[in-house]
Image (cartoon, grey):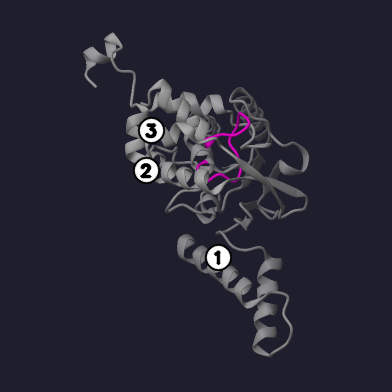
Amino acid sequence: MGLLDFLTGKRSGLGVEELARRTGVSVEALRSIRPAYRKVEIPKRRGGRRVLQIPEPELKAIQRRILHRVLARLKVHPRAVAYRRGFSIVGHASLHAGKEVVVTLDLKDFFACTPAARVQEYCRRVGWSKDAAAVLTQLTTWEESLPQGAPTSPMLSNLVNFKLDARLEAAARRFGAAYSRYADDMAFSKSTDVPREIGRLIRCVKLIVENEGYTLHQGRKLHIRRRHQCQVVGGLVVNQRPNLRRKQRRLLRAVRHHMATNRPATLSESQLKGWESLEFMIRRQSS
């Protein structure tokens, strides 16, 4: 689009035809899809139930095409480390390893609190026309928010929150801290432990988060851990370098011993292989 066209409004962005070309789905098909989801409950790791909205097969197939052909190359803030190729929970933890103090906070109902209006606004900002942005929003949101369970939701949650991450990183720098976010889990760490500064940082984070439309979990999901305590980021201990918790390492040793001596073990072979893959990733990425 030329400057003259932009100034005169002859073209207001990439249209639905371009979206159809990229996804390999006709304009008529894109417009005719009526989003449908089914709700599935799964247990949370720390108790309770999580409700997922799973898109029906036709919608899921198009969402996957949107993810890989429309969203994949768009810019994500470097401190948003979840759902990205080449990034992992180990990298999230490594940034905070060996620090004097580590603060972890959790965003409440992260996907449900990311509104459809923000998705549509983002699509317009990256170059789609009003019509195409509306189609993209219809195909990737449900009940006015990001559905937790859609293939596109994780990537969109990163893309539309670039400003949130930029503001939080700037706040962290102002207090001499490091920052990273893995989905709804945020971590800050400092090489110096000044309680007054930690309190000011947390209050600043709370204000930024609320200004961006989210809410922090309070109480047990806000942790301030110092060097003499077990510092945990993303489920990994980071007092020295990223590692599994001691009780997890002991469990794995016991399982291996039981399997080697043909005794009943608390994990299956496939579960043990999953844990061993995580151990290998930790060693490789934190060495």
Which amino acid does the dot numbered 2 rest on?
Arg
Q: Residue 72 placed where, x, y %?
A: 40, 43
- Marks counted in the figure total 3
Instruction: Report, in whole angstroms, how far the alpha carbon at label 3 lies from the one at label 1.
Output: 43 Å
Disc 3/disc 2 C-alpha distance (Å): 16 Å
Residue with the mark numbered 3: 27
Image position of 46 (left or right of 4): right
Residue 131 falls within the magenta-colored stretch = no
Q: Which of marks 3 and 2 is nearer the N terminus?
A: 3
The amino acid pointed to by label 3 is: Val
The quadrant where residue 62 appears = top left
- Asked if the stretch drawn in magenta spans residue 150, the answer is yes
Mark 3 vs mark 2: give the one in front.
3
Q: Residue at x 28, y 13 (%)?
A: 10
Disc 2 crowd rating (10 Å Cα; few below 14, some 14-19, many 20+) is some
Magenta span of residues: 140-152
- Sequence-wise, the earlier of marks 3 and 1 is 3
Amino acid marked by disc 1: Leu
Query: Which label is found at residue 278?
Result: 1
Give percent across and percent down for residue 186. 60, 41
- Residue 272 x, y percent position in the rendering: 62, 73
Residue in the image at 77% along x and 53% along y: 47
Q: Which residue in the protein does label 2 denote? A: 69
